[in-house]
Amino acid sequence: MTPDLFTPVPLEPLPFRLEVGDTVVSLGSCFADEVATRMQEGGFRVEANPFGTLYNPASVAASLERIVDDCEITADDLVQHDGLWHSWHHHGSFSRSTPEECLAACNSRLHQAHRALSGARLLIVTFGTAYVYEHEGVVVANCHKLPPQTFTRRRMTADEIVSLWQPLLQKLHSAYPQLHLLFTVSPIRHLADGAHGNQLSKSTLLLAVDQLLSTPHSPLPTHYFPSYEIVLDELRDYRFYGPDMTHPSSLAVDIVWHRFQQACMSPATIQQVHNNIKQHKREKHIPLHQ
């Protein structure tokens, strides 16, 4: 008898079914972008990371609050450094050479995300790390290469994350009663924190999500997808990582994407998504000779 060479992660079907054409909003770490790209190619309407890549639960919560309220970024939210204007709430991809350009880029995506969330079937939130950087007592989404002494670095506690997100879940349900929220924890390892520090961080995120899922009488349908466990426990092999040995390889993301489809799509929808992705690849293909 051939022995099993991996430990499968049990995966129960999620209590909703996505259909091609549904609107999905995705916020969080760069791993969220990978899955969002596949969803978009498969025929879903996807609004992915309208504030850019966000890693910690506090920044994701702050961005989501702004999206729900359609609350614009102002000049007070900007900082100038190395010839560019940056938003404390955004990834560096939104930085521009003038404050007006920076605000226009930030607020254009914010309004777009507000419109998308109003009709969204699913909100995916991916936490990457429990470590935060604070500037004058406020958590920033990105340090934008300012000097390290500008910030205070610490690790959030699970209780702190829960207390931040519980009222937000209530607010989301009040504004969008049709919405389902799917939490996931990024399998990308933050080895700059050290191997032990990374484990403490991921454990904090997992504990916080577990508490949010078990909140009694939570009005918002809230679920969990084990992308972290699939990559770390089921795949568990450096063949499934990229050259930096911290980011999952394209094959690993494909496997997680396949498991995600199994969890929340019907066989007919999965086939339709597969056909759409094949068509997308054909349209992107450029013949060598025409």
Image (tube, rainbow, N blue to C red):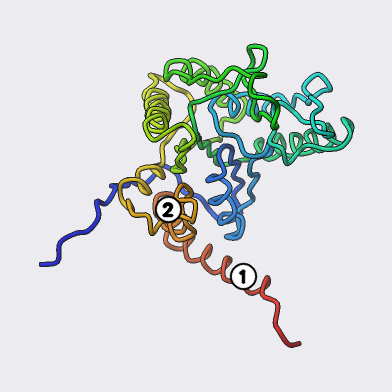
> Tag 2, which secondary structure?
helix
Q: Nearer the viewer, residue 53 or 246?
A: 246
> Tag 1, which secondary structure?
helix
- Residue at screen point 51% across, 66% down: 274
- Residue 70's tag is none
For label 1, the crowd category at 10 Å Cα-Cα, with few meaning under 14, some 14 to 19 and many 20 or more, is few
**Image-quadrant location for residue 225:** top left
* Residue 263 image point, x, y percent: 40, 50
Left/right of residue 39 with respect to residue 114 in the rendered view? left
**Image-quadrant location for residue 48:** top right
- Residue at screen point 61% across, 60% down: 41
* Residue 141 image point, x, y percent: 64, 28
Q: Nearer the viewer, residue 214 or 204?
A: 204
Q: Nearer the viewer, residue 22 or 205?
A: 205
* Residue 186 image point, x, y percent: 47, 40
Residue type at numbered disc 2: Val
Label 1 or label 2, whichever comes before in sequence order = 2
In this rendering, the count of numbered labels is 2
* Contact? badges 1 and 2 (CB < 8 Å): no
User: Which residue was labeled with disc 1?
Assistant: 281
Q: Quadrant of the N terminus?
A: bottom left
What distance separates the C-alpha of mark 1 from that of mark 2? 20 Å
- Residue at screen point 54% across, 69% down: 275
Residue type at numbered disc 1: Lys
Q: Nearer the viewer, residue 255 or 262?
A: 255
User: Which residue was labeled with disc 2?
Assistant: 256
